[in-house]
């Protein structure tokens, strides 16, 4: 159990339905303007305990894939501590921690969709990178009544709704085949002006 008065890393205390809990804060710049905003699903207890995003096995795969395609190279012990130096940020659709594989409920998605859209308006990211495609699909369904499923990689048809380039991250273990995942990651590196 994490004590509210001994927070570390990116831990913060939030309240939902009268219950206080420790979670991970959004990592966002003070001034608007981001190259890329990662939109995750929800922190896991392992990440919250560490005080840093994506510290579980699946999360480590996320950081490794970013490194493999030279989309992001951390210069600090914990990758998320280097995000702002690259003009990247990170948030979650739901802030109440869930274990890996547990989905946020409908209310969390509805409230999270509004919060994410507000962050997009303020921070004006050039690229929105949804770490889990289902989060993107749910946001589109709930907020825009969109019934089509997004594709892994860039989704130019979504740019009129979300004023940024929209990228669904091909997380290892998803139905995205390796060849398509690699091509999507190379596209992301290219758009960011990086080489892969």
Image (cartoon, rainbow, N blue to C red):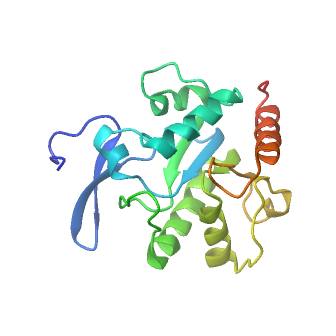
Question: Where is residue 74, by image quadrant?
Answer: top right
Question: In this orientation, which residue lies closer to the viewer: 89 or 42?
Answer: 42
- For residue 123, side relative to residue 196 (left or right): left
- Residue 145 lies left or right of residue 113; in this view the side is right
Q: Position of residue 67 (x, y in %)?
A: 63, 28
Residue lying farthest to the top in this orientation: 75
Compared with residue 26, is residue 192 higher up or lower down, i.e. above or below? above
* Position of residue 187 measured from the top left corner of the image (x, y, whole percent): 82, 39
- Residue at horizontal 78 percent and vertical 26 percent from the top: 196
Residue 153 in sight: yes
Which residue is located at x 70 percent, y 58 percent?
175
Q: Position of residue 96 (x, y in %)?
A: 36, 61
- 82 above or below 44? above
User: In percent of the image, x 15 and y 47: which residue is there?
Assistant: 3
Residue 183 percent coordinates (x, y): 83, 41
Q: Residue at x 22, y 40 (%)?
A: 7
127 lies left or right of 193: left
Task: Give the total of numbered labels.
Answer: 0
Above or below, comparing residue 25 to residue 86 in the picture:
below
| Residue 31 visible in the shown view | no
In terms of image quadrants, where is residue 88? top right
Residue 115 or residue 95, whichever sits in front: 95
Looking at this view, is 78 or 128 the one in front? 78
């Amino acid at each position: 159990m994490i004590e509210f008065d001994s927070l570390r890393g990116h831990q913060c205390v939030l309240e939902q339905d009268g219950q206080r809990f420790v979670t991970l804060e959004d990592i966002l710049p003070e001034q608007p303007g981001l190259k890329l905003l990662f939109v995750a699903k929800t922190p896991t207890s392992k990440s919250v305990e560490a005080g840093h995003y994506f510290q579980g096995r699946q999360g480590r795969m996320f950081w490794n894939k970013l490194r493999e395609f030279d989309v992001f190279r951390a210069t600090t012990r914990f990758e998320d501590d280097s995000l702002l130096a690259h003009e990247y940020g990170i948030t979650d659709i739901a802030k109440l921690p869930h274990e890996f594989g547990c989905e946020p409920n409908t209310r969390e998605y509805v409230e999270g969709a509004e919060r994410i859209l507000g962050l997009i308006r303020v921070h004006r990211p050039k690229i929105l990178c949804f770490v889990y495609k289902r989060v993107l699909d749910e946001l589109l369904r709930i907020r825009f009544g969109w019934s089509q499923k997004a594709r892994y990689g860039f989704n130019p048809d979504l740019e009129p709704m979300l004023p940024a380039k929209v990228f669904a991250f091909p997380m290892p273990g998803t139905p995205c085949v390796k060849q398509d995942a690699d091509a999507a990651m190379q596209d992301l590196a290219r758009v960011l002006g990086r080489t892969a």
